[in-house]
Amino acid sequence: MRLTFFGIGYVGLVQAAVFAEAGYQVMCVDIDPQKIENLKAGKIPIYEPGLESLVRENVASDNLLFTTDAQEGVRFSPLQFIAVGTPPDEDGSADLRHVLTVARTIARYMEQPKTIVIKSTVPVGTADKVRAAVDEGLKERDRIDLAFDVASNPEFLKEGSAVADCMKPDRIIIGTDNPGTEQQLRELYAPFNRNHEKIIAMDIRSSELTKYAANCMLATKISFMNEMANLADRFGADIERVRVGIGADPRIGYHFIYPGVGYGGSCFPKDVRATIRTAEADGFDPVLLKAVEARNELQKGFLVNKVLSHFGGDVRGRRFALWGLAFKPKTDDMRDAPSRVVMEALWQAGATVQAYDPAAMTECRRIYGDRSDLALCDTKEATLTGADALIVVTEWKQFHAPDFQAIKLALREPVIFDGRNLYDPMIAQRHGLEVRSVGRKR
Ligand code: UGA
């Protein structure tokens, strides 16, 4: 079977490579010639465990092809995936420009019937817009005889485990109002639908909303726990005990109830905002989602407030060691990362930062360039030299069991601001270190 993917970002590249691995021949189309050249040589533009070898192997076996030629991509296969980005526009709505450009491109070059599958995360109603754009394109060419269908097939992969998530999805959502299209997509996903049924077929609009609902639900769990952590902080309770206490109820569960410095990344912040904007545009006031977003924004300032209050509200001239720049472990992604809020607030307050991250150093350099108030260190230990205190923002494995003795000796003040509740305050205390966590007694 042959497939075409438009858009070789996170979702597109991972899903295309995984389909290629399953034995399909996949052509990937992107407008960025440099990216395409690199990919042909097996060089991937993102950090994602297992992805580079998967791409290399499938490029070598000719199952994964890359091109900038959209016409070649359209002609290549009956199944056309749209996996381009839907970045937020100024008001936070999803910008569908790229999605609709691909739709028009397909209409311009198609000569055979096509099934157009939307993989990008898009608001409810987008499939209708894609259908209208293709209809219009075909009318302009006087080719309304050409049949096509549009389906929704959202992606649920997580950065850092994207390849595994795609290889073994926990569910495959197929949104279509056409039994023929459903059958076509069921066959496509058959290699991923073994052992037990993972395909959930539904109408297009429900499928489109499922994607946003899933991310909004997870973001809500996190904001809820962060709110509880604030209460625990004030009331002298320990949120980690509360977490275990409530997670034991299977209706609540242990997943996604870890308090911290707020959710970041390219999905939750963007998708919660986009859902809010779509609701408002339809005249509905999504009060709950607005609160989820508001709590998250406040939460990003939580750690900085602790730092400021520890230093009597004045950190001018102080130097902070910062562990973790990526929005979560196993990625180099710093989009909407809490580390950025923490660093920018510290700079604003006149402090300097010495940072280390196992994967996101290049990305950090790209974002902030050379600045006198930021030193990017080669190791986590190097950040401690001359630092007043340590701030931990991302829960990389490398940070889980540090040498407390060495930290105590290196820091000017023996205090760790632990934004992920990684450290047991009692153990640290035995080494003479004070740990300020999220929602735990000092
Ligand atoms: C998220 C979803 O988990 C995926 O299912 C979805 O497919 C993806 O968005 C997407 O829409 O593409 P991702 O953004 O890669 O995946 O990262 P997550 O592991 O979900 O973490 C998101 C943020 O929530 C991180 O900042 C993380 O630190 C934070 N988080 C997560 C918490 O603060 N507490 C938790 O208990 C869990």
Image: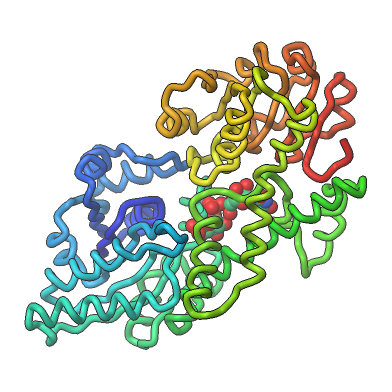
The answer to whether residue 362 shows anywhere in this view is yes
Position of residue 183 in the picture relative to residue 384 (left or right)? left
How far across and how far down the image is residue 223, in percent? Answer: 69, 57
Q: Quadrant of residue 398?
A: top right
Q: 266 or 191, which lies in front? A: 266
Q: Residue at x 44, y 68 (%)?
A: 154
Q: Residue most toward the left?
A: 142
Q: Residue at x 18, y 51 (%)?
A: 67
As drawn, 267 above or below 422: below
Position of residue 403 in the picture relative to residue 204 (left or right)? right
The answer to whether residue 2 shows anywhere in this view is no
Q: 337 or 113, which lies in front? A: 337
How far across and how far down the image is residue 192, in percent? Answer: 45, 65
Position of residue 246 in the picture relative to residue 21 (left or right)? right
Q: Residue most toward the right?
A: 236
Position of residue 108 in the picture relative to residue 4 (left or right)? left
Q: Residue at x 35, y 59 (%)?
A: 19
Q: Quadrant of the N terminus?
A: bottom left
Q: How is the image coloured?
A: rainbow
Q: Quadrant of the C terminus?
A: top right
Q: Quadrant of residue 353?
A: top right
Q: Residue at x 14, y 79 (%)?
A: 138
How far across and how far down the image is residue 349, in percent? Answer: 63, 29
Q: Count how many numbered circles sit on residues in the image.
A: 0
As drawn, 222 above or below 38: below
How far across and how far down the image is residue 282, in percent? Answer: 49, 79
As drawn, 421 above or below 366: below
